[in-house]
Amino acid sequence: MATESSVFQRRRAPSVAETNQIPWLALLTSDERARITPQLVVSDPMPGDYVCRMGRSATFWFGVIEGLLKMSTDSASGRTITYTGVPPGGWFGEGTAIKREPYRYNIMALRRSVVAGLPIDTFHWLLDNSIGFNRFVMNQLNERLAQFIEAREIDRSNSPDVRVARNLAALFNPTLFPGVGEMLRITQQELAYLVGLSRQRVNVALNTLQEQGAIRIEYGGMRVLDLTALRAYGTTT
């Protein structure tokens, strides 16, 4: 397994196409973009690479350009607790960056990915100077609070179908993950890692959701057909 240091060593300047996939850049003024863009870096973590490690100091604010990451923690007993996946368009760790505190979670690549990073000092400069950036971060924090409240509710459910439906709905959040759209590139094994179920049980749940018209299983991923139904799944069944 590659180490987190190799991810940092593989950093490079983003391409124009990669820069265009950063949602908050469009909210900056032209002068702000001219100042910020040269400071952005990207890296290409491989499956199993850590982008962030628990206890390490935050030096960048990160976002996913391509691929899929997993946010988790390791308990004292050695059990891994998975909180969420981070698909394309998702930026994470703003709370940690604001407080300049060590990470309280691990972020690991589930597949080959492209991850962008903004230096933490630049992040704070934007907070001090950009109204558009502040609105973006405020929306992120608000949506993430709702996301983790929902995650607690999911944890209390004993229904695998509910766990799969609600976790899928979270990955289709248009505010947190604008790069996903209606089609999420994810394998059943990757979804199993995020949900904490076997691939076989996830397969059963996905087929149930497809039969009910909430999703369509396609080559390489899932297409959402009824996001409202996914979000409410299990509340009346």
Image (tube, helix red, strand yellow):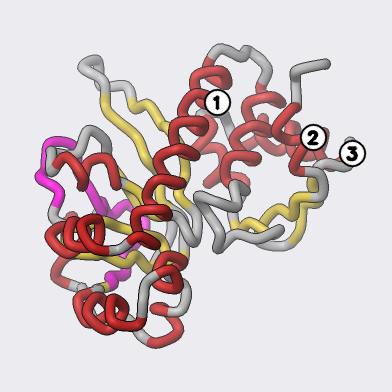
Q: Judge by depth and name the residue closer to the eye, 111 or 100.
A: 100
Task: Give the residue drawn at x 44%, y 31%.
Answer: 145
Of labels 2 and 1, earlier in sequence is 1
Mark 1 and mark 3 lie on one chain; the one further toward the N terminus is 1
> Marks 2 and 3, Cα distance to the nearest angstrom?
13 Å
Give yes or no for contact between labels 2 and 1 (Cβ–Cβ under 8 Å).
no
Q: Residues within 10 Å of mark 2 (few under 14, many from 20)?
A: some
Please name the residue shown 76% across and 58% down the image: 218
Q: What is the magenta range?
A: 42-58
Q: CA distance from mark 1 to mark 3?
A: 24 Å
Q: Which callout, 2 or 3, points at the residue further toward the start of the chain?
A: 3
Q: Main secondary structure of the magenta part?
A: loop
Circle 2 residue: 229
State the image coordinates of residue 152 (x, y, percent, origin top left). 49, 19
Residue 132, relative to residue 186: is it above or below? below
Secondary element at tag 2: helix
Q: Mark 2 is on which residue type?
A: Ala
In-image side of 39 versus 150 (left or right): left
User: Which residue in the structure is indicated by mark 1?
Assistant: 150
The residue that mark 3 highlights is: 211
As measured in the structure, the alpha-carbon distance from the residue carrying label 2 to the one carrying label 1 is: 15 Å
Q: Position of residue 62 (x, y in %)?
A: 30, 57
Q: Quadrant of residue 132?
A: bottom left
Q: For residue 15, which quarter of the picture? A: bottom left
